[in-house]
Image: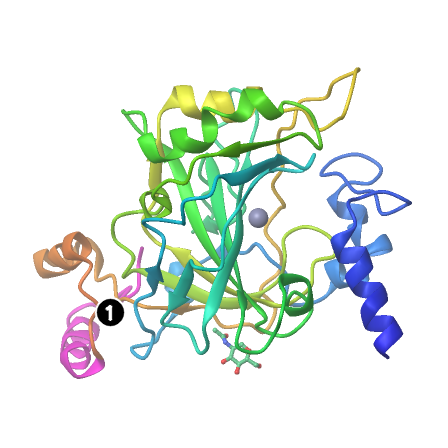
Amino acid sequence: MLLFTLLLEVIWILPANGGQHWTYEGPHGQDHWPASYPECGSNAQSPINIQTDSVTFDPELLVLQPHGYEQPGTEPLDLHNNGHTVQLSLPPTLYLEGLPRKYVAAQLHLHWGQRGSPWGSEHQINGEATAAELHIVHYDSESYDSLSEAAQRPQGLAVLGILIEVGETKNPAYEHILSHLHEIRHKDQKTSVPPFNVRELLPPLLAQFFRYNGSLTTPPCYQSVLWTVFSRRAQISMGQLEKLQETLFSTEEEPSKLLVQNYRAPQPLNQRAVFASFIQVGSLYTTGRRDWETGKVWSSPQHEPLRHRLLLGHHRCLPLAY
Ligand SMILES: *[C@@H]1O[C@H](CO)[C@@H](O)[C@H](O)[C@H]1NC(C)=O
Ligand SMILES: [Zn+2]
């Protein structure tokens, strides 16, 4: 058993080589992942399409509090092109409060599409993808000593998913990453970036989110992730998106292959529940609108009478519409 665990860890830590080779498209593409990585074909995979009329409001969900995000130390952070994504290492001084245990940060990375494509996120909300998605990966440091150990255990990881859309202006926080991409154009190249305020990569409002049990979205697809997908989006400029789509290569040398379309298709929900931290009353009532603006999370005693009224007043009511 110990040997088996060690073996799994070796597979997890080693880069994709020695037969452990996967891509998003083609003969080793996502449809073929389960053949080499059985868990990729299992029944609680990520990403998912979040249908907001099927989510369950959970008034017990706590608003996540990221700690240490504003100042991630004084040492430079490693930025790495691993051939599948661009990944920034994070120190364990960054951690999350508001989950069943303390989860410390390990890394963040991005998923995106290709030039001219408005789709590149992994998660979808009501069937709609966005231009890109940020994942901030944390592990349960109370139960496990390392990311690789936690990555194979139920709820060993907590990943934040931030949908990214194109807005009018350049997002200076994302520039701390994007301005260094040209230094790591090829697979396995690394550079270091000065520490910056990681909190600013997130949407300003964190109170509205979805929570579900899922998996890593890349092989070996371990079903170890407690997911938090924020309802609000972060925005970057079109120029920034194009830099993400056009700078990196997935190969070490010529012929170079652009690192694009590194997102997995939504996976079947199967028997899983998706919980929401909020009630979106939608456009029916201006009060609901105000909640949308302030992100006020309804607690059940306040909410129940309103929901009741809505149900009585409208034969078809979507209390959780996005
Ligand atoms: C995740 O799975 C665990 C174990 O089955 C369960 O206790 C927990 O409520 C689930 N959490 C969510 C968000 O579905
Ligand atoms: Zn990811």
Q: Which residue extends farthest top?
A: 254
Give residue 279's quadrant in the image: bottom left
Q: Position of residue 100 (x, y in %)?
A: 44, 78
Q: Main secondary structure of the magenta part?
A: helix
Provide the residue span drawn in magenta.
300-322
Give the answer, above or below, for where 15 lies relative to 280: above
In front here: 89 or 87?
A: 89
Q: Position of residue 300 (x, y in %)?
A: 22, 81
- Image point 19% across, 81% down: which residue? 304
Give the answer, above or below, for where 92 lies relative to 133: below
Q: Is residue 9 magenta?
A: no
Give residue 182's quadrant in the image: top right
Decide if residue 184 is on the left or right side of residue 300.
Answer: right
Residue underneath mark 1: 315
In front here: 232 or 78?
A: 78
- Mark 1 secondary-structure assignment: loop
Decide if residue 238 is on the left or right side of residue 304.
Answer: right
